[in-house]
Image (tube, rainbow, N blue to C red):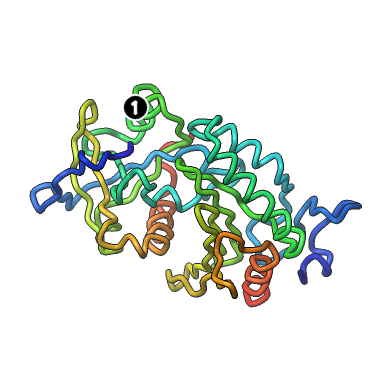
Amino acid sequence: MAFAASGRGEFDGAGRLKRVTHLSDFTQVDRTFDLEGRVAELRQLAEDPNDPLASLRLNRARDVLQTVVHRAGLAPLIFMSEDYDVEARWIIGHTVVSVTFSDAIRGYVFDRETEQIVDRLALDDGRQDIVPGWAIADFLSRWNSDS
Amino acid sequence: MSIQPDELPELDEATRLTSETLLRNVHPSYVEKGFDEPSPMIFSPTQTDLGLLSVDRESRRTAVESFLFRRDVMQRKTAGVLAVTTEHVAEVLLEAHENEVDGNDAHAVIDFRPRLAEREVIRETLLKRALEQGWQVRA
């Protein structure tokens, strides 16, 4: 959230993030980020592009990530496993924030210096399948502010 | 290569690998264009792997041969090959075992079953070790 307000991202007229800029410790600086394009690319790369599970997972990740990116102003790398787990990954200095969309949404912060997970995405209601984008954005922003 | 429940291999001291480089083909959906660093999910078994992560033994097949085998013989997608050693596997308190299968005498597995609940830490560490050695093959 702080980053959307600080002008470190470029937004279009509808408030959608077009580009991430000027994040000194952020290794994904100055990359053009196209969420729809990346999701479409992953759909094509799926072992079976017609598998409905791939579409389900990608659509769900896309919907949540739209909110995350808009609120946190940080664009993730997005990957998909061969059994269609979708991972959004932010690399901030030595800190990695990883959120995986599978049967449930799970997230953790990994500190590469200590090689330990130092935090996990916590949800008030315990319903990991309905974690909202703002909760992930807050989780991400906290760690980016601390780095 | 997924493993069927009735095909679970017998892994014991006789099959354990102690000095080997283990090659892992990287599916292109684990990579983003322009970034060297793939997802650590490549070092985590999928549900159908039943806790056993497939790798190739470098002593039986070079990285280039592993890449070509995956692409041309198995006809599966690959974006390249990363490698970890049996020492790296021991560092995360796991074992690697030889596991020849039909048509693939270089096949081996990293047995995640003793620490499956800790796979998120393990996969991050194995990815870090693999990237320290660099890509063995990059398509």
Taking depth in this image into account, of B119 and B22 the one nearest to the observer is B119
Q: Which residue is mark 1?
A: B69
Image quarter where the C terminus of chain A lies is bottom right
Chain that bears disc 1:
B
Query: Based on the displayed image, in which of its 4 quarters is residue B112 positioned?
Result: bottom left
Residue name at image x 35 percent, y 46 percent: B83
Residue name at image x 54 percent, y 47 percent: B36
Taking depth in this image into account, of A146 and A132 the one nearest to the observer is A132
Q: Residues within 10 Å of mark 1 (few under 14, many from 20)?
A: some
Residue name at image x 55 percent, y 36 percent: A52
Image quarter where the N terminus of chain A lies is bottom right
Q: Is residue B70 above or below residue A8?
A: above
* Residue B93 falls left or right of residue A101: left
Residue B96 rendering spot, x and y as whole percentages? 22, 51
* Residue A75 falls left or right of residue B61: right
Residue B113 rendering spot, x and y as whole percentages? 27, 57
- Label 1 SS: helix
- The residue at the far left in this view is B14
- The residue at the far top in this view is B72
Q: Is residue B100 above or below residue A58?
A: above
Q: Amino acid at mark 1?
A: Phe
Query: Based on the displayed image, in which of its 4 quarters is residue A129 positioned?
Result: bottom right
Residue A90 rendering spot, x and y as whole percentages? 60, 59
- The residue at the far bottom in this view is A146
Residue A20 rendering spot, x and y as whole percentages? 75, 56
* Residue B25 falls left or right of residue B87: right
Q: Is residue B27 above or below residue B37?
A: above
* Residue B98 falls left or right of residue A15: left
